[in-house]
Image: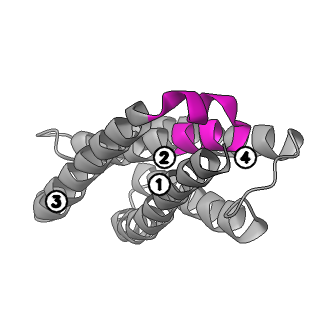
Amino acid sequence: MLDRWDNFFVMVGSGAAALAGLIFVAMSIKPEVIIQNTTHKNRAINMLSGFTAVFMACGFALIGNQSPRALGFEWLVLWLIATAIFIKGYAVAIKAGVSFIGLNAPRLGGGTLCYLAEVLAAMFLILGYAAGLYIAAVATVVLFAFLISGAWLLVIGVYEDQTRR
């Protein structure tokens, strides 16, 4: 069952790795602006950890001769950690009271739903339901949209902070 998904996981994993690299390079241009702003710093952590989680999930899916159940356990651990990082980043930024474009309930809710869908997909695989792969695929594609838009908001936010100085 998993071998029919190889192309999907290769494509998505490669995209996640490339985008994580681009974000890392973009962040290294003005790291002091990101480090000094709670929202920027946590958004950067969330974008890097999100793309890293997608890359790792795809890597786990491409391990040969493993059962969907084994993949489900790998994904469950991975996505629980990624979900915790995502929620913690928002909690820290909200607690700090930082107001910034893109830090809002729809982004928090949508992103959280994507991460929780990945956890649900993992549980489906553990229980032996192939639907877990479809849930994971849809959640990953939607999560990509959140991650890319978050990366864009980070770049715009850093630029706006520079122009205010």
Find the distance from the CA under tag 3 to the CA under tag 4. Answer: 29 Å
Find the distance from the CA under tag 2 to the CA under tag 4. Answer: 12 Å
Mark 4 or mark 1, which has the lower sequence index? 4
Foreground pick, 61 / 101: 101
Residue 151's tag is 1
Indicate the amino acid at tag 1. Answer: Ala
Q: Secondary structure at mark 4?
A: helix
Find the distance from the CA under tag 2 to the CA under tag 3. Answer: 19 Å
The reply to whether the C-beta atoms of the residues labelled 1 and 2 are less than 8 Å apart is yes
Residue 56's quadrant in the figure? top left
The reply to whether the C-beta atoms of the residues labelled 1 and 3 are less than 8 Å apart is no
Indicate the amino acid at tag 4. Answer: Tyr
The reply to whether the C-beta atoms of the residues labelled 3 and 4 are less than 8 Å apart is no
Residue 47's tag is 2
Question: Would you say the magenta stretch is mainly helix, strand or loop?
Answer: helix
Foreground pick, 120 / 129: 120
Mark 2 or mark 3, which has the lower sequence index? 3
The crowd level at tag 2 (other Cα within 10 Å; few <14, some 14-19, many 20+) is: many
